[in-house]
Amino acid sequence: MIPLREKIGYALGDAASGGITWKIMSVAFPLFFTNVFGLTFADAAALMLIARMFDVITDPLMGSIADRTRTRWGTYRPWLLFGAIPFGLVFALLFFTPELGPTGKRIWAYSLYLLMMACYTMVNVPYGSLLNVMTEDSDERNQFSAFRMVGAYAMGFITLFSFPYLQRMVGGTEQHQYAVLGAGFGLVAAVMTLACGLLTTERHKPVIAEKFSFRQFADLFRNRPWVYMTLIAFCTNFFNGFRYAAAGYMITYCLGGDVTVGRFIINYTAFMAFSEAACMIFGAFSPAFTRKVGSKHRAFILASLICCVCSVAYFFIPMDPAYIWVMIGVSILTSVGVGFYSPLLWSMYADVADYATEQNGTSSTGLIFSSGTMAQKFGGAISGSLIALLLGVAGLVSQTDMLTGETSVVITDEQSVRTMVWALFSLFPAAIAAIMAVLAYKFPLKK
């Protein structure tokens, strides 16, 4: 019987990476880079796409390295123990806006963003792989995955809901606010990552991986469950990426800025915090939901359909602050589906890793889980890039003053921009959710 302390410790890992760093990067970065830091929409879109090309190399490489790590602390845990401080430090620096010209800022943003992705990979790929060596029991893996998702969404709720209040507490310019909050959240993320490494135990040694060979990558593409799982993971993060990245623009351009309801300040982070709470609650019920439905892939199909239907319904809500609670309500219903499928994603990856070990005779756990992390970052970044490009097409344009070098945002077609933002938060994710359901239906492992 694995103690509760260890499950909570494992949850802290994704509370740090998924609940703090990735959540802020998904929700705040698009708006931060264009409206606060001073990048143009084209620069922001290119930054995220270039970073993803970088991840194509670093994620599988990190997975392969992690599989071959042998230390007295274990195979995967050392990366959490020794990667925690760089992880938090680089995140903090990424929110600092230096007093540089357009070219200097561009270099700073590109360099720090790529470094942050490398640090995220260094910590998160071994973290995901850790699940396979803590337990071999499928039900316990579901429980660990549920704890992981509850940790991520609980911390995501705290992070996003507190963000506007912390900004007011810090005061000063927006650049100062983001710099201080980046440092604070970076410190918390580092401590949580370190705690995860200290509180977890590697009970099972992975099958020793053979020397590095490109044959391993060829084996992946012959592994049908892996192909489907990677496409599913890409779609889940594409779905989330559209919603989280579009939220800031939705509040700003569709609702006219932050909405105040009594004492509540509902800005884009607080708006998505309600969804985080729903994901946390229903993520905890994901194992029970899966048992009730009968299999992981059936549960995933139903969860995807919930996301699809609710996302379509959102499009027909009037763009009026008076309907803010209706918007929040439908967004919460959408997140019920997200809460159900999120723990399943990593549990299904563990099944794929077991399948690969049976077929090939050696461990490729880190490599397989790295593809999940890569799909996560690809989905989030490509959706963010597409949002920047589509908003530019709709009429949201960045202009740089040739004398001061300052960048400002200009709307050339207000109605077109509003409609595009609304669709990016609803219809685009709905289409992705429909594809997710089809892929889950065809997933070969029917556990």
Image: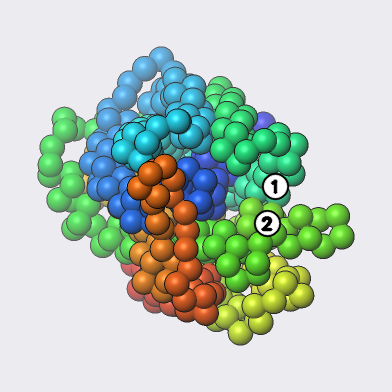
Residues at circles 2 and 1 in contact by the CB criterion of under 8 Å? yes
**Residue 267 circle label:** 2
Q: From what the image shows, is residue 416 above or below residue 241?
A: below
Residue 48 visible in the picture: no
**Residue 164 circle label:** 1
Residue 142 location, x and y as percent?
Answer: 55, 51
For label 1, count other residues whose C-alpha is less than 10 Å away and answer few (under 14), some (14-19) or many (20+): some
Q: Residue at x 52, y 75 (%)?
A: 414
**Residue 220 circle label:** none
Q: Residue at x 41, y 63 (%)?
A: 397
Residue 271 location, x and y as percent?
Answer: 67, 60
Q: Residue at x 69, y 76 (%)?
A: 320
Q: Amino acid at mark 2?
A: Asn
Q: Residue at x 15, y 50 (%)?
A: 218
For label 2, count other residues whose C-alpha is less than 10 Å away and answer few (under 14), some (14-19) or many (20+): many
Q: Which residue sits furthest top? A: 72
- In the image, 28 versus 402, the foreground residue is 402
Q: Secondary structure at mark 1?
A: helix
Q: Is residue 312 left or right of residue 238?
A: right
Q: Is residue 16 left or right of residue 220?
A: right
- In the image, 20 versus 374, the foreground residue is 20
The answer for how far apart the CA atoms under marks 2 and 1 are is 7 Å
